[in-house]
Amino acid sequence: MSAGFIAILVIVAVFIIGVTIWATNSAYSRKPDTIDPDPLQQQTSDEAKKE
């Protein structure tokens, strides 16, 4: 194995690790999706407000 081949392997490994860290950080840094409230519970609370 020549020095150039080992250098290419190291560069590819560093690239893959960097992309993995970047993708993980972007996934965890975004705001979580809002969960829609239960529509039945929403109706009952709206009816309670009307009364």
Image: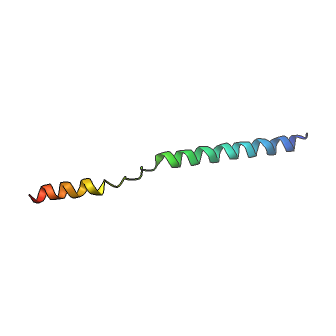
Q: Nearer the viewer, residue 50 or 1?
A: 50
Q: How is the model colour-coded?
A: rainbow
Give x and y (percent) for residue 42: 24, 56
Question: Which residue shows up at 77% across the image and 41% down it?
Answer: 10
Quadrant holding the N terminus: top right
Question: Which residue shows up at 34% across the image and 55% down it?
Answer: 36
Quadrant holding the C terminus: bottom left
Give x and y (percent) for residue 50: 11, 60
Query: Is 3 drawn above or below residue 36 in the view shown?
Result: above
Q: Quadrant of residue 45?
A: bottom left
Give x and y (percent) for residue 14: 70, 42
In the image, 27: left or right of 40?
Answer: right
The residue lying furthest to the right in this view is 1
Give x and y (percent) for residue 22: 58, 47
Q: Nearer the viewer, residue 21 or 44?
A: 44
Q: Nearer the viewer, residue 42 or 28?
A: 42
In the image, 22: left or right of 45?
Answer: right
Question: Which residue shows up at 83% across the image and 40% down it?
Answer: 6
